Image (tube, rainbow, N blue to C red):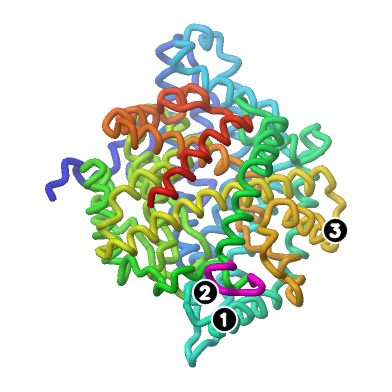
Amino acid sequence: MNTTIEIPTKPKRRFLPDDLKIESWKEVEKYFVDLRDRKINSVKDLENWLLDWSETDAVFEEDSAWRYIKMTCNTADQQLVDAYNHYINNIYPHLSPFINELNKKFIASPFLQNLDAEKYHIFIRKVKKEVALYRPENIALMVESQNESQKYGAIIAAQTIEHDGKELTMQQATSLLKSNNRELREQVWKKINERKSEDTKQLQDLFSKLINIRHQIALNAGYKNYRDYKFDDLGRFDYNVNDCLSFHAAIEHEIVPLLNKIDEERKQKLGLDALMPWDMDVDTSGGQPLKPFSNSADLITKTINCFNKVRPYYAECIEVMNEMNHLDLDSRKGKAPGGYNYPLYEIGVPFIFMNAVGTHRDLVTMVHEGGHAIHSFLSRNLFLTEFKNIPSEVAELASMSMELISMEHWEEFFADANDLKRARKEQLEKVLRTLPWISMIDLFQHWLYENPANTAEQRNEKWVELVNRFYSKQINWQQHEDVKNRFWQNQLHLYEVPFYYIEYGFAQLGAIAVWRNYATNGEKALDQYQNALALGYTKSIPQLYETAGIDFKFTQAYVKELVDFVKNKMNKI
């Protein structure tokens, strides 16, 4: 395949030296002093000053990004950990006050009113909110919070089990839960959770500390709780707490009963008297676990071929990333958990990190992160760095839509027609299961931060209450209540990116709507999808969804409409 995207190089800088190394604050402070003290005598001066600030933002963001990427690729390398911590502890605390000064300088400029209101509206409202939230006494607390939250990844990355004479990462072990051998599944599930239980207290203590730090940040900023503070900090201008509660209620009413019915059928098909936690991933028809790829090179090749059938441009994005070594896909000991697409604002080519072990779930993760990557490519030439800093409600729309759009071409991963049907059905069931889980995690966070004095025992009690509301009532937890109590600890977002989760729910509904459009008029739907992604964050979230040809809403009627579409698709597989 001939790529039309040339391998990018960093653009020549207009303000900072091309060879700048961010090693100490003393060496870089002068550039921020320049921005802070520079005279602005016209609208043109203001726009040029914004471009210099934007370049500085991109350079520092990318330096921080690479430190994080390298650390998560190998948490056991102390030099990489130290390099990341150096930035958090020795650069960020100096950087934050200057950013506040630049924000205030921008808002106070007499030429602000002469800027194109439509072009800069989103940026201006964000800067005004940042100025309102800024408190110098919170800088040290934010550093402490980042330092503490990164301990979660190290704890989880160190978790392995011994099985069949081999040491397995948790990702490798979890793949065995798809085995048709029920005794094996039970054995592995118990080993996984026995190992996780060793860290339960450590993770509870860490979480208690994080809640205390975050609550103090909120109090310092004049908020009564961290939930209300974080809604503003995340720039949730286009929806509120009641919208989230409406989403939860719609999901509980429309999807939870459907999943209970699906799991009742699962129990019957497996011929079981009781559906146990280790019975949830096995194929009910007795098929072997799906193997969509053999290794990471195969995953990359097949993803490129799949994306090429959607649109060649999407394949080219992954090819460029592969050429630039911006993909680290394999699971290994010492690697941080999870997966992500990290945007790199200066070079404009993101980095995909994941923990692949050859499962169908890995395929979904790859096309999901691939959707994020395509978003980065489409928005890379926007002239302000902040325009490329996409709100999660839209970023996740890009990725979750790609899961469903690419599914139409998964024959690249599954040569066997029955395997392809299984994969598509499993994906759609996963879409449905995702929504109650998102509701649980989001509601849990609302409660946690509205009640910041909560104890470990109270957290577990609240979590069980949510499990009983939103989780399958077919699963038998007898003798495993301890796992039921604490499996919220598996959710990285609670520790590392608080309140970043409801976005997945809104985006999942949006992705179903994008997919529905694609099923009706493929090329038009892709045009709308691309047009929305190319806007970055230059429009409001509802406007971006409208550009994508869909609605940004969470009513019960709308949820039912989308769920009925998914059910209809599942029935036709």
Q: Residue 31 versus residue 122: which sits nearer the camera?
A: 122
The answer to whether 466 is drawn above or below residue 193 in the figure is above
The answer to whether 380 is drawn above or below residue 83 in the figure is above
Q: Residue 247 versus residue 163: which sits nearer the camera?
A: 247
Q: Is residue 388 left or right of residue 416?
A: right
Query: Magenta stretch: residue 427 in it?
Result: no
- State the SS at label 2: helix
The residue segment tinted magenta is 267-276
Of callouts 2 and 3, the N-terminal one: 2
Three-letter amino acid code at the position of disc 1: Val
Where residue 14 appears, as percent x and y from the top left, is 33, 31
Query: Magenta stretch: residue 271 in it?
Result: yes
Of callouts 2 and 1, the N-terminal one: 2
Q: Is residue 85 left or right of residue 440?
A: left
Q: CA distance from mark 2 to mark 3?
A: 30 Å
Crowding at mark 1 (Cα within 10 Å: few <14, some 14-19, many 20+): many
Three-letter amino acid code at the position of disc 2: Leu
Find the residue positioned furthest to the top.
114
Where residue 556 appears, as percent x and y from the top left, is 63, 32
The answer to whether 87 is drawn above or below residue 413 in the figure is above
Image-quadrant location for residue 268: bottom right
Q: Is residue 543 left or right of residue 316?
A: right
Q: Which residue is mark 2?
A: 177
Main secondary structure found in the magenta portion = loop
Image-quadrant location for residue 201: bottom right
Of callouts 3 and 1, the N-terminal one: 1
Image-quadrant location for residue 474: bottom right
| One can see residue 395 in this view | no
Q: Which residue is mark 1?
A: 188
- State the SS at label 3: helix
Three-letter amino acid code at the position of disc 3: Gln
Q: Residue at x 19, y 43 (%)?
A: 6
